[in-house]
Image (spheres, grey):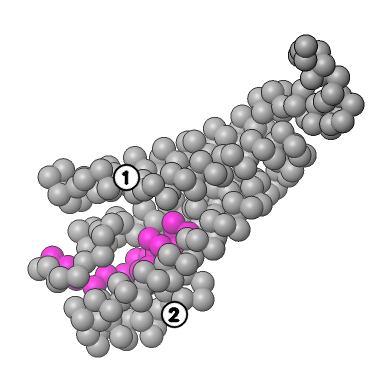
Amino acid sequence: MFCIKDLQRFLHKNFPMLVLYGSASFSEIFSYTACRQLSQMVAAIIFFHTSEYILAVGIHGRSNVTLKSLLISKNYLLAMILSFLEYFLEIVLCPSLKEYWWVSQTGLAMVVVGEIVRKLAIITAGRCFTHLIKIYHEDHHHLVTHGVYSFVRHPGYSGFLMWAVGTQIMLCNPISTIAFAVVVWHFFAERIPYEEYFLRQFFGHEYEEYANRVSSGVPFVK
């Protein structure tokens, strides 16, 4: 009868590297580097979403804010789960990949800067900043061109792009870094022209001048 010892002998004989990686996985996963990177990632996610919700409530009022202001969608959850899966697979199969501290610290810096830029965008725009694109003009809605908006037209988007890609660089996730950059960029590349169509309807020539003078804030998007 086939037993556990037979399986162990089979694995040692035919897949010695798999046995080696499997035996080292727990020590690698709970190493200092892994604990630091994962704790930074969890802290970044929690702070980003809770602060988004708190600011939305503070600016627009509790009655005008739903849980959608947490910005957690099914696609977003899937992307984060896959990024964590990549991290655990790579730290088991190739732990040295996670030891590039300068790469991880660069990612952390991007997360911090992206967070600051996005929150400055929210605070500067105030009630003009919403998570959903406005297709009807409201009385309190005016064109914001000062502060961080004097440097880029969509600092909220550029901040999120930097934050999202930075989280994956911080984890030293090469696959997710590329995937996050492509997916988030593509999302904004489609969203910005749609949003600016309505902004041009609302503010006319004033917005045209602003758009010609200030870049979008997202690379390769006019």
Residue at x 36% of width, y 56% of height: 120
Mark 1 lies on a secondary structure that is helix
Residue type at tag 2: Lys
Q: Is residue 23 visible?
A: yes
Please give the label number shown on residue 5.
none
| Residue 18 position by quadrant | top right
Residue type at tag 1: Leu
The vertical placement of 44 against 193, above or below, is above
Whether residue 126 sits left or right of residue 179 in the image: it is: left
Q: Residues within 10 Å of mark 2 (few under 14, many from 20)?
A: few
Give percent across and percent down for residue 204.
22, 85
| Residue 98 position by quadrant | top right
Q: Residues within 10 Å of mark 1 (few under 14, many from 20)?
A: some
Residue at x 64% of width, y 52% of height: 175
Stretch in magenta:
140-161
The vertical placement of 28 against 139, above or below, is above
Residue at x 49% of width, y 48% of height: 79
Give percent across and percent down for residue 169.
61, 50
Give percent across and percent down for residue 196.
30, 76
Does 153 appear in magenta?
A: yes
Q: CA distance from mark 1 to mark 2?
A: 28 Å
Q: Quadrant of the N terminus?
A: top right
The residue nearer to you, when weighing 219 against 27, is 27
Q: Which residue is mark 2?
A: 222
Q: Quadrant of the C terminus?
A: bottom left
Does 187 appear in magenta?
A: no
Mark 2 lies on a secondary structure that is loop
Q: Which residue is mark 1?
A: 70
Give percent across and percent down for residue 45.
45, 41
The residue nearer to you, when weighing 27 against 104, is 27
